Amino acid sequence: MQIRTDGVTWQEIDGELVLLDLERSVYLTTNGSGALLTKLLVDERTLDDLADALVAEFSIDRDDALRDAQAFVDELVAHQLLR
């Protein structure tokens, strides 16, 4: 999976991201972990890649990381921000 680059822009503010879909006039704000995952999704990544990054960055349990990564991906899908 990968974040859409066509018509999508973002701005980082104090470790958080605001993503804006210019074509649909929809925006999404993220926390620090969402910012990390969004940056990773500039390139093709798997859910396991995202969970590994959360474990490495925040020292959280692998199961929690997988749940958090899936929830974030679900949010991106709901906002049509993945390609």
Image (tube, rainbow, N blue to C red):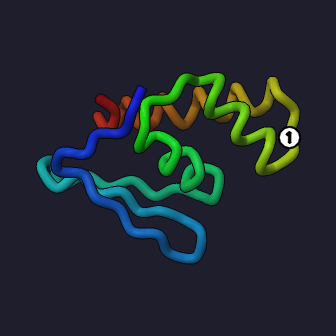
Q: Would you identify the image quadrant in which residue 82 lies?
A: top left
The residue at the point 77 percent across, 50 percent down is 57
CA neighbours of label 1 inside 10 A, class few (<14), some (14 to 19), many (20+)? few
- Spot the residue most to the bottom: 14
Q: Would you identify the image quadrant in which residue 51 lies?
A: top right
Task: Answer with left or right where residue 48 lies relative to residue 55.
Answer: left
Task: Answer with left or right where residue 44 lies relative to residue 31.
Answer: left
Q: Position of residue 35 (x, y in %)?
A: 55, 55
Q: Position of residue 26 (x, y in %)?
A: 25, 52
Task: Answer with left or right where residue 8 lies relative to residue 42.
Answer: left
Q: Position of residue 69 (x, y in %)?
A: 62, 33
Look at the numbered disc 1 and give the secondary structure of its residue. Answer: loop
Residue marked by disc 1: 60
Task: Answer with left or right where residue 71 lies relative to residue 5.
Answer: right
Count the marks.
Answer: 1
* Above or below for 33 versus 76: below
Q: Quadrant of the N terminus?
A: top left
- Spot the residue most to the front: 43
The residue at the point 47 percent across, 62 percent down is 17
* Above or below for 12 versus 53: below
The residue at the point 81 percent across, 50 percent down is 58
The residue at the point 82 percent across, 28 percent down is 62
Q: Position of residue 83 (x, y in %)?
A: 29, 29
Amino acid type at circle 1 is Ile
18 or 36, nearer to the observer: 36
